[in-house]
Image (cartoon, rainbow, N blue to C red):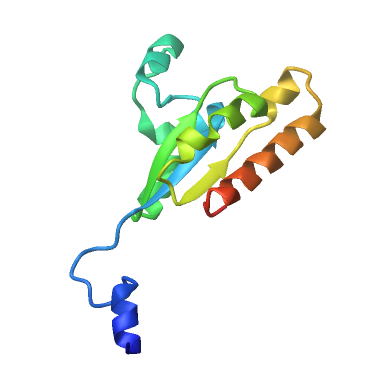
Amino acid sequence: MTLGAVLLLAGCGGSSTAPRATLVATLGDSITAGSPGYDPDPRMRETLGFGANQKSQWQYWAQKAQPDLRFRNCGVYGQRTDQIARRLDECANGARVLVVQGGINDIAQGRPVETAAANLRRMVRRGKELGLLP
C-alpha cells in the first residue's frame, strides 16, 4: 500500500468533507456551569433566577475563538469533587477532550484540600483511561 493510500484511509487529505468538530466535555461546578449568569440545566436557570445568557460561560468564548470545538457543559452548582467525579463517565461519553474543574466547594464546605486534589487527580487519570485528551 502506498503512503498516499494509507493517508487517505487514515482520513488525512483528499477528503471533500469538512473535518468534524472536536467535542470537549467540561466537567465541574458552578464555574464550569457558567456562573454567575448561566446554568446548562433550564430548571436550574429558573431556580437560580438566571436567563439564558450563554455568554456567561467560558465555553461560549472558547468556541467563538475556536469554532472547530463543541462543548458539552456538565457543570453543576455547589458540587464537590467527589460528586463531580461520579458524573465523569456519563459526561465524557463520546468526547475527545476532557476539562475538569472543581475544588472550591470542597474548601467552602470545610473538606481537606488534599482530598479535593486527590479527587481531581483521579478524574484526570480516569479521563486518560477513557482515551480522552487532557
Which residue: 40% across, 17% down? 45
Image location of residue 134, percent across then percent down = 57, 52
Quadrant of res 20: bottom left
Which residue: 32% across, 89% down? 2
Which quarter shows the N terminus? bottom left
**Vertical order, 107 against 2 (above or below):** above
Which residue: 70% across, 43% down? 121
Image location of residue 46, percent across then percent down = 38, 12
Image location of residue 19, percent across then percent down = 29, 62
Q: Nearer the viewer, residue 46 or 3?
A: 3
**Vertical order, 110 against 35 (above or below):** above
Q: Is residue 3 visible?
A: yes
For this orientation, the residue located farthest to the front is: 1
Q: Is residue 60 visible?
A: no
Which residue: 35% across, 87% down? 3
Image location of residue 35, percent across then percent down = 50, 27
Quadrant of res 7: bottom left
1 vs 113, left or right, is: left
